Image (tube, rainbow, N blue to C red):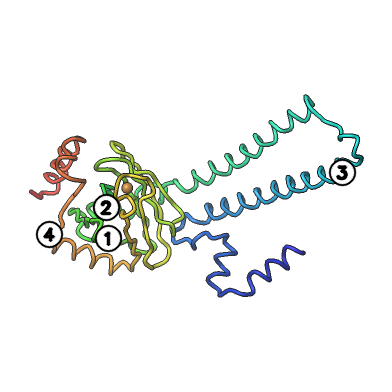
Amino acid sequence: MALAAVGALLLGGCDSAEKTSIERLAQPVGATDRTDAIHSLWMGSWLAAMLVGVLVWGLIIYACIAFRRRRDDEIPVQTRYHLPLEILYTVAPVIVVLVLFYFTIVTQNDTLAAASPSGKADHTVTVVGQQWSWTFNYDKDPALDGKTTVFEAGTPANRPTLELPVNKSVDIKLRSADVNHSFWVPAFLFKMDVIAGKVNHFSFTPDRTGTFVGRCAELCGTYHSRMLFNVKVVSESDYATYLKGLRSQGNIGPALGGSEIDQQNGLINEVQKNNSSTGAS
Ligand SMILES: [Cu+2]
């Protein structure tokens, strides 16, 4: 009751955007079909933390009052080597961690499940993280011609944009051209590491149009903080127009990183193989 009154007082003085932000405990409004589970985990974790907090604060206050020193010449009973209490101190945090671990794993599996049961998403985008920007390869996209891979490459000064069609599933493949990075779009409530020498992937369906900020979430070098990008979720026809634009600009890929780096990582052969199979030179 008191909590509700304080909440009403706090919420009273702010506009509706702030109000929903407080109601969501500062979590951004999700923009994909995978955000509900993460949002529940977020809210549930805070609720659990609050319950544990209230219990601990309550016990502290109770102990301070009930076991305070009552007479100057006598110190309160000192409890030590109390086995049942020590077992409780050990077991209780382990239970808390196990519960959080369980819900995290369930949510993670939910979030990482393939976007379609067949594992075949409507679109595939290979994202390359490189010091210090991103390249987005639209792999043989059916919205273009199903054969040509087009790309957009960014620089720290020229922030790249990843365009995605709304309500269509997409498989994002993450690879690094150099060191480890991390692909993070706060509005997707999702982040995945981009590991050098390994391809990570995840799939989802963007469910509302808009422009969302993205960033690198792994300290990857001097200009790490400039590894920013935008994600623009657009209609299907705008998406097709965008891909055609990239093709007419000559951005024919795949572009998987600088050639020296590609050679180092053994990716150059893969580029050549892909080029020969698409007929590009
Ligand atoms: Cu980075």
- Determine the CA span between mark 2 and mark 4: 20 Å
| Apparent side of residue 120 relative to residue 93 in the rendered image (left or right) | left
Q: Is residue 72 left or right of residue 212?
A: right
According to the picture, the residue beneath numbered tag 4 turns out to be 250
Q: Relative to 30, say whether 95 is above or below.
A: above
Mark 1–mark 2 CB contact (< 8 Å) = yes
Q: Nearer the viewer, residue 131 or 66?
A: 66
164, 18: nearer the viewer: 18
Q: Tag 4, which secondary structure?
A: loop
Q: Position of residue 53 (x, y in %)?
A: 69, 48
Say whether disc 3 or disc 4 marks the residue closer to the N-terminus. Answer: 3
Cα distance between the residues tagged 4 and 1: 19 Å
Cα–Cα gap, marks 3 and 4 = 77 Å
Q: Dot 2 corresponds to which residue?
A: 133
Task: Using a 10 Å C-alpha cutoff, classify the residue at mark 1 as few (fewer than 14 neighbours), some (14 to 19) or many (20 or more).
Answer: some
Disc with the residue nearer the chain's start (4 vs 1): 1
Q: Residues within 10 Å of mark 2 (few under 14, many from 20)?
A: many
Residue neighbourhood size for the residue with mark 4, other residues' Cα within 10 Å, grouped as few (<14), some (14–19), many (≥20): few
Task: Please provide percent x and percent y for residue 249.
Answer: 13, 63
Q: For the residues marked 3 and 1, what is the alpha-carbon distance in whole angstroms?
A: 61 Å
Tag on residue 171? none
| Residue under pointer 1 | 159
Answer with mark 3 or mark 1, whichever residue precedes in sequence. Answer: 3
| Residue corresponding to mark 3 | 66
Residue at 13% over, 42% down: 272
* Image quarter hosting the N terminus: bottom right
* Nearest-to-viewer mark from 3 and 2: 3
